[in-house]
Amino acid sequence: MAEMKRWTCEVCGYIHKGEDAPDICPVCGVGSDRFTVTAIEEFKPKESKGKWKCNVCGYIHEGAAPPESCPVCSVPASHFSALEVPSVGGDGQVIAQRVVIVGAGVAGVTAAETAAAIPGAEVVIISREAQMPYFRLNLTRYLAGEVSASELEMKSSQWFKQNNVQLVFGDVVAIDRTEKKVSMKDGTSFDYDKLILAAGAHSFMPPFPGAHREGVYTLRTQKDADAIIDMVKTGKKAVVIGGGLLGLEVAGALRNRDCLVSVLEGYGWLLPRQLPKRAGEMLVDVLQKQQIDVITKAATKEIVGDETVRGVLLEDGRTIDADLVVVSTGVRANSYLARQCGLTVDRGVVVNDSLRTDDEHIFAAGDICQHRGISYGIWPAGYIQGAVAAANALGANQKFEGIAPSNRLKVLDADVFSVGHINPQDASANVYEYEQGNVFRRLVVRDGVLTGAVLVGDTAMASQIQEAIDAGTRLSSWPALQSVFPCLQSK
């Protein structure tokens, strides 16, 4: 592995690449005398067959090299890593046949793209939404006014024509497994040889009294975003119920539109699934500095008002005034069709490593499916699952064995990165933490192998750590990591 000089700011933890330390730290402003030089072994980038994943937002790029900047979140090429996506082929014999795909999100569109590459394959993809397939992961940037509606589009109508993929708009109301047919609400139907369920998920609305009032929204579709944008005006008071990733991004987007924003989180800190307590507390401070009010341990009792929302009543008796409320309390798989036709469903449609359901002719991918007990709900998983499901539907023998989930915040001016298993459930894992100023880092190591990491305040090493975890890198093979995690030196 090649070595290069890196300079670490002793005050804030900022890392500078170069032969010399910077004159002034761009983060905290101290002089060059407060930098120490370290040599950190760089991971040799993996070779790619043309798939690159943005480690910030999860966008997948196809090409011999990553793009100069991500078209979704604008980060530079250095934030991309090679992505291994199973191709059609392998031990199975590829068979051209009619594949019907229900759902036009990332999993469905990737499945269509994979299937369309097989000569003779007939591909039909059915979208419940009326517009062309779009980047759902970019809805918060659309809500913030950072991207336009045209920039949301994932595939154009021309792409579907050129690739002989039939795009159908409408609702599927039934699946007949005996006749191998899906029926539409308008009375039409489509026969299939293989069916791929990629119908995604919907926003979960808890049974709050008053949830029906005008001015209460969720954010899952472009239509939802348009409704919120129509409502938003400068000075509006907005309350976001839920301090998860989407909730915080919604809060940042509304603040970007000059709303007065409050975030209500029932847990004791923000992002409890992605961050340990100390990191979540530090994130609260970051949001407060951006004039986003955060209330933790806030249990919602009722959304109050008349026809229109006027506020949120908490269990402790406080009322938070609101002109609009966005509820962001998770999603639920759109599994009703699978249930109706008798497939095994838990939190999602249960699939094996081939992404096959308990019907040999039906596969599932993306937010709708549950693999090894996990419903990922993230872009990279949907992309890979869509490719694997389509390949196997056409006779290949590919396996999806899971991925290390990673998360980054968009819209907010906050450097937060979380990957893998960051909260061990037993004592078999070692946890190493480091905090200085506004920088927090955590590494989780099991049997000497990196399995999880959290970076707050400085995410310069996010791509390297992501690759290390994906590759199952042993801590002993990366000794220079001690310069960034001083706590490791005494272990």
Image (tube, rainbow, N blue to C red):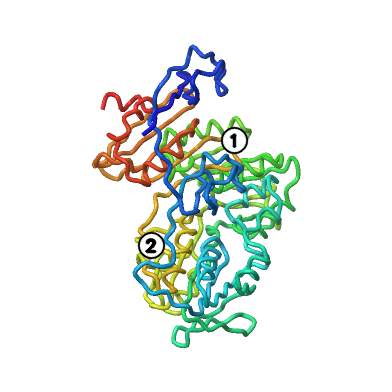
Asked whether, in this view, residue 88 is left or right of residue 166, the answer is: left
> Where does residue 186 sit, x and y in percent of width and height?
64, 82
> In this view of the protein, which residue sits in the foreground, 195 or 457?
195
Asked whether, in this view, residue 418 is left or right of residue 160, the answer is: left
Q: Residue at x 64, y 73 (%)?
A: 169
> Where does residue 144 sit, x and y in percent of width and height?
67, 45
Quadrant of the snapshot with the C terminus: top left
Task: Report crowding for label 2: few under 14, some 14 to 19, many 20 or more residues within 10 A (C-alpha).
Answer: many
Examine the rendered structure and indicate whether residue 256 appears above or below residue 341. Answer: above
Asked whether, in this view, residue 142 is left or right of residue 78, the answer is: right
Determine the secondary structure under disc 2.
strand
Examine the rendered structure and indicate whether residue 272 appears above or below residue 136. Answer: above
Kind of residue sitting beneath label 2: His
- Which numbered circle lies on residue 371? 2
Determine the secondary structure under disc 1.
loop
Residue 122, by quadrant, is bottom right
Whether residue 319 is visible to the viewer of this picture, yes or no, is no
- Which numbered circle lies on residue 174? none
> In this view of the protein, which residue sits in the foreground, 96 or 467?
96
Quadrant of the snapshot with the N terminus: top left
Asked whether, in this view, residue 121 is left or right of residue 311, the answer is: left
- Label 1 or label 2, whichever comes before in sequence order: 2
> In this view of the protein, which residue sits in the foreground, 372 or 253?
372
Examine the rendered structure and indicate whether residue 259 appears above or below residue 373. Answer: above
Residue where numbered disc 1 is placed:
413
> Where does residue 115 sit, x and y in percent of width and height?
51, 70
Q: Residue at x 52, y 78 (%)?
A: 120
Q: Residue at x 53, y 72 (%)?
A: 101
> Where does residue 392 sit, x and y in percent of width and height?
41, 70
Whether residue 222 is visible to the viewer of this picture, yes or no, is yes
- In this view, the residue farthest toward the bottom is 179
Task: Report crowding for label 1: few under 14, some 14 to 19, many 20 or more residues within 10 A (C-alpha).
Answer: few
